[in-house]
Amino acid sequence: MSSLKTFISEWVIDFFKYLRILLSYFVAHHLKPRFSAFESVKSVLVGKMYQQRGKHAQLIVNSVMVTVMVLSVTLGPSVIVNDSQTQAVMSLGLGSKFAFAQESSPSGETARVLGLSTDSQVEIDPLTQVSDKPRADVLEHTVENGDTLASIAKKFGVDTDSITWLNKGLSEKKMKIGTVLKIPPVIGVVHIVKAGETIYSIAKKYNVSAQAVVDFPFNEFTNDETFSLAIGQQLIVPDGEMPDEPILSPRSNLASSQTPNAGVVSATGNWIWPTAGSISQGFKSWHKGIDIANRGGGAILAADAGTVIVASWLDNTGYGNRVVIDHGNGTKTLYAHMSSFSVVVGQTVKRGDKLGMMGSTGRSTGTHLHFEIRTGKGNANPLVSLK
C-alpha cells in the first residue's frame, strides 16, 4: 500500500515538472517572439509621436481663439443689452414682471422697458460713467467736419491754450479736416526734460508750484526722495503757462491769496482760512484738496470747531505730519505737511485755534499747507466753502 502511494506522489511530481517544461517551451518559442515584435512596433510609433510632439498645438490654440472671438462678437451685444436693461429695471424697482424690449428712435438714442401687465412705459436715459481720474498720456485727435478748437478742448476737458501750446503753429485757420492734433491729459503744459533742469526750474518756468508737478499722479521721477528727472522724459505741468505767450482761455481754478481771521468764534459749518499764503495748487480730481504756500511758514488754524482725532505722522502716505479734526457733523478737515503740533489727540478746538506750524514734511517740495474737507460723499472743494 505504501509503495502505491509513493508511486502516485512521484507521478504527480513528474507531471507538474512536465507542465512547467512545456510552459517554458511555449513561452520561449511562441510568446516571446510576438512580444518582441509588439515592442518593436510600439517603439517605432512612440518615436514618431515624440518627434512630432506639439506639431498641431498652435493650430489647436488658434482654432480655440477664433471660436471664442466669433462667440463674443455674435453673442456679446445681446448679453450686454439684456444685462443693462435688467439693471435699469431693477433700479426702478420693477422686478421680474417686465419683459425687455428695445425700441429704436430715428436717432437711436432712446431705450424703453415695456411691461406685460400694463401699458405704461418707462423711459431710460442712457448714462455714461465718467472716471474722475486724469488721463496719463497725450492723445491724438483727427479733426472732423464741424470741429473747432473750442469744441475739441471741451470734448477732452482741457482749454484751447493747452492744445495750441502742444501743437506748435496751430491756429483755427490752419486746422483742416484730417489734421491730427495732440491733446494733453490736463490743462497745462507738456514738457520734455532737458539737461540741467530740475522740478523747481521747470515749475518756475511755467509759473506753477513744484508741488503741483509732483502731485500729478502720472509724473515719474528717477528718485522719489529728491524728485530727480531723466533727460528726455515727458513731464505734465498742470495749470502751467507757456512763457511769453498770452493766455486766451479763462482759468477759474486758481484763487487769490487769503488771510485767515483767527479771532472768529466757532460757528459749525462756517469755515475760515486755515493759514495765510497763496494758492499754489487748486482742487483736482487727483488732488483732493488745496495747497496754501508761504515761504515764511506760519501758524495753521482750525477752520472750524471740533475734536482732534489725528496729530502725528501716522503712516507713509505722503502727508507727513498732519492733524485731522472731526467736526461732529459728518465732516472732517485735514491739515498736512506740518512742521510741529500744538494740539494732541482727543482735545477739542475752537474755530481759529492754533493747530501747529506750517512745514514741508512728507511728500513735499516746499513750505506749504495741504488742506482737505472730507465729507460722507467724498472730498469737497475747499475754495467753495472758505470765507
Image (spheres, rainbow, N blue to C red):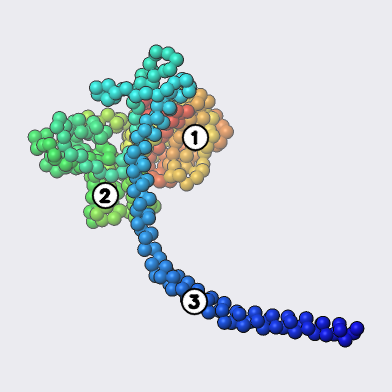
Asked whether 172 or 293 is in front, the reply is: 172
- Give the Cα distance between marks 3 and 1: 87 Å
CA–CA distance between discs 1 and 2? 35 Å
Check the image and report above or below for 197 versus 87.
below
Q: Would residue 357 appear left or right of 161 to someone viewing this image?
A: right
Earlier sequence position, callout 3 versus callout 2: 3
* Residue at 40% over, 37% down: 370
Q: Is residue 153 visible?
A: yes
Question: Which tag is nearer the camera, tag 3 or tag 2?
Answer: 3
The x and y percentages for residue 59 are 35, 57
The residue that disc 3 covers is 37
Mark 2 burial class by Cα count in 10 Å: few <14, some 14-19, many 20+ = some
Image-quadrant location for residue 78: top left
Q: Which mark is residue 87?
A: none
247 left or right, relative to 238: left
Q: Earlier in the sequence, mark 3 or mark 1?
A: 3
Dot 1 alpha-carbon crowd within 10 angstroms: few under 14, some 14 to 19, many 20 or more: many
Q: Position of residue 123 (x, y in %)?
A: 36, 19
Image position of 188 with respect to 92: above or below: below
In the rendered view, does 262 fall on the left or right side of 166?
Answer: right
Q: Position of residue 67 (x, y in %)?
A: 36, 47
Q: Is residue 316 depicted above or below 174 in this figure?
A: below
Asked which secondary structure carries label 1, the reply is strand
Q: Which residue is mark 1?
A: 324
Front residue of 313/191: it is 191
According to the image, label 2 marks what residue?
Answer: 234
Q: Nearer the viewer, residue 164 or 323?
A: 164
Identify which amino acid the numbered label 2 is placed on. Gln
Q: CA distance from mark 3 to mark 2?
A: 72 Å
- Amino acid type of the residue tagged 1 in the rendering: Val
